Amino acid sequence: MTFSLEGKTFVIMGVANKRSIAWGVARSLHKAGAKMIFTYGKDRTEKSVRELSSTLEGEPSIILQCDVTKDESIEKCFATIKEETGIIHGVVHSVAFANKEELDGEFVNTSREGFLLAHNISSFSLTAVAKAAKEIMPEGGSIVTMTYLGGERVMPNYNVMGVAKASLEANVRYLSSDLGKDNIRVNAISAGPIRTLSAKGVRDFNTILKKIEEEAPLRRTTTPEEVGDTAVFLLSDMSRGITGENIHVDSGYHIIG
Ligand code: NDP
Ligand code: N5H
């Protein structure tokens, strides 16, 4: 199943390697004929993004740094996008971070610094990026972010990231309310667990995946392709009536229990 996004340009934030959910989205967008601009956070990620993007056929993608903890980095990144491509039609925000030591043990022990860091990178960044992106979306567009069920329910070890995802999900609703008059839609995809670099080191990840295989309505785990294809739908006019929504791409697991 493909939707044509020929002639449209999207900014993809959060490709770290070939397992990244953002890379799953990029593959689906490529199939739909879209043009992409990739952004990365850390200097050390640039090489991997360049190598991956070079595997996509067609004209080379633009690759820029955008460290979402820095206003100047976001401003510079979107100013360069404006110079290089003029307008864009949407953004995929697939960025989150929390200190490793706060993704284990009890949430009650979260430090002020760790709490603010997780919220800064994983939620406020969407607000800051939406503001910058709006300036180069004169025809309207679509913004999609990635969340997890731990933002709605207590999940073991998700801790401060669960609170940050609850903030992100509310962020989606408030942004969609503001930006609707500019014909910009804002939605989240709540993905089921996928083995990515961020998930590396998560204790009992196999057990989490096994539970989904046994209990989710579709009896299988989520793939980056499934998330990518839903993102294409949300970025396309096929979803033109949808904003402020959180679509679960999780084999239906969220309805259980
Ligand atoms: P990845 O590790 O592949 O992606 C995380 C990305 O966040 C990296 O590209 C990283 O880039 C980026 N990032 C972190 N800090 C910053 C920063 N300061 N500025 C810019 N970018 C930054 O993991 P996923 O693909 O799994 O994660 C993508 C999104 O999907 C996250 O929001 C995650 O919470 C969400 N999600 C993941 C699930 C899963 O099971 N994997 C399930 C549900 C949601 P860099 O290293 O260059 O800083
Ligand atoms: C309930 C769970 C298991 C507990 C796992 C929590 C995962 C939280 C996600 C955050 C984004 C992970 C994170 O920040 C890891 C960093 O501390 C260390 N890793 C890095 O710095 C790498 C190198 C970079 C690339 O990572 C980032 N993020 O920058 C949730 C799981 C079942 C599902 C899951 C894994 C959800 C999710 O939100 O990612």
Image (cartoon, helix red, strand yellow):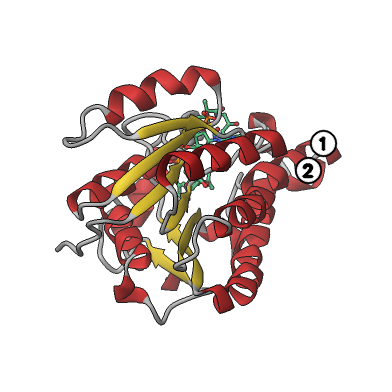
* Residue 52 visible in the shown view: yes
Q: Is mark 1 within 8 Å of ligand 2?
A: no
Residue 141: image x %, image y %?
A: 44, 65
Secondary-structure class at tag 2: helix
Three-letter code, disc 2: Leu
Task: Check whether the beta carbons of the residues at disc 2 and disc 1 lie within 8 A of each other.
Answer: yes
Residue at 44% of width from left, 61% of height from top? 189
Residue 53: image x %, image y %?
A: 29, 31
Q: Quadrant of the N terminus?
A: bottom left
The answer to whether residue 139 is above or below residue 22 is: below
Residue at 61% of width from left, 33% of height from top? 67
Three-letter code, disc 1: Glu
Answer with the quarter of the image where residue 112 lies: top right
Residue 172: image x %, image y %?
A: 59, 66
The disc at residue 116 is: 2
Taking depth in this image into account, of 207 and 221 the one nearest to the observer is: 221
Taking depth in this image into account, of 162 and 11 the one nearest to the observer is: 11
Residue at 60% of width from left, 60% of height from top? 151
Secondary-structure class at tag 1: helix
Q: Is residue 247 left or right of residue 117?
A: left
Disc 2 crowd rating (10 Å Cα; few below 14, some 14-19, many 20+) is some
Answer with the quarter of the image where residue 21 lies: top left
The answer to whether residue 41 is above or below residue 228 is: above
The answer to whether residue 146 is above or below residue 180 is: above
* Residue beneath disc 1: 113
Residue at 33% of width from left, 40% of height from top? 23
